[in-house]
Image: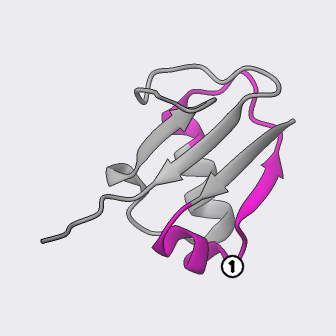
Amino acid sequence: MNKILFFAHLRDEVGEESVQLEVAGKTVAEVKAIVAEQYKVAKLDTAMTAINEEFAPNEEVIQDGDVIALIPPVSGG
């Protein structure tokens, strides 16, 4: 089982701070697709992903117990 954390507007879109999903063996890109479909979240293709607090590319494979954070791009001034 994996914990998926949502930040900024993604948290608002999902309606939860985090969810538990079984995504071990899937890539980051596959996890983004699952979350987008299951929770009707748009624009995950531009979200940064961290696995266990380290940024990870879309090709990274998720292991059982990994904590995945989805972080949308943020602008500031």
Q: Is residue 75 above or below residue 29?
A: below
Horizontal side of 43 relative to 27 (left or right) equals left
Q: In this view, does 34 lie above or below 26?
A: below
Q: What x and y, as percent, mark residue 1?
A: 87, 35
Q: Quadrant of residue 52?
A: top right
Q: Which colour scheme is used?
A: one colour
Q: What x and y, as percent, mark residue 22?
A: 83, 38
Q: In this view, does 68 lie above or below 77?
A: above
State the extent of the magenta-drawn residues as a range.
Answer: 7-31
Q: How many marks?
A: 1
Q: Which of 21 and 49 is in front in this view?
A: 49
Horizontal side of 2 relative to 5 (left or right) equals right
Q: Which residue is drawn at 72% across and 72% down?
A: 16
Q: Which of 36 and 76 is in front in this view?
A: 76
Label 1: element kind? loop
Q: What x and y, as percent, mark residue 15?
A: 69, 79
The amino acid type found where label 1 is placed reads Gly
Q: Residue at x 32, y 52 (%)?
A: 46
Horizontal side of 36 relative to 43 (left or right) equals right
Q: Mark 1 points at which residue?
A: 15
Q: How crowded is mark 1: few (under 14 residues within 10 Å), some or many (20 or more)?
A: few
